[in-house]
Amino acid sequence: MDKLNHYRDIVQTVLSDYAKMRSGPSHYSQLELQTLFDVNHDHYQLVHVGWQNNGLRESEGHRRIYGPLFHLDIKNEKVWLQLNTTDDDITQDLVRLGIPKEDIVLGFQDPYMRQFTEFAVG
């Protein structure tokens, strides 16, 4: 398998695993986790969508939730971590499954600061 398809498989596996880990019923929420995979343009996201009830009664306190947990792109055969709104270190999972650190870019980091990380600069 070529490098690009291998990286696509890993990114999709990692995001699918996170979706499975975080899925489950909750009394106060009707949230759905969606994995969004645009393989043609190499954009990958895990997103919360739904409603959350913060009130004591079912009829009060509903709030619409839409927000990405992770956003990754593949550009020039490197995996770009564009967003991570969790405490999870998704880079460790990418490395564990076979993507070397020199092929992972912390896209949310200032370009100047990337040189001081153990990952690729861009």
Image (cartoon, grey):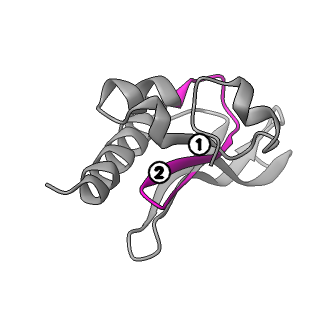
**Left or right of residue 100: residue 114:** right
Tell how many labels: 2
Q: Is residue 78 visible?
A: yes
For the residues marked 1 and 2, what is the alpha-carbon distance in whole angstroms?
Answer: 7 Å
Residue placed furthest toward the bottom: 40
| Circle 1 crowding by C-alpha within 10 Å: few under 14, some 14–19, many from 20 | many
Residue receiving disc 1: 105
Kind of element beneath mark 1: strand
Kind of element beneath mark 2: strand
Q: Quadrant of residue 8?
A: bottom left
**Bounds of the magenta segment:** 72-90
- Residue 48: percent from the left, percent from the top? 61, 50
Measuring 56% from the left and 49% from the top, which residue is drawn there?
Answer: 80
Residue receiving disc 2: 78
Callout 1 amino acid = Val
* Mark sitting on residue 18: none
Are discs 1 and 2 less than 8 Å apart at CB?
A: yes
Callout 2 amino acid = Lys
Measuring 29% from the left and 30% from the top, which residue is drawn there?
Answer: 97
Q: Is residue 23 visible?
A: no
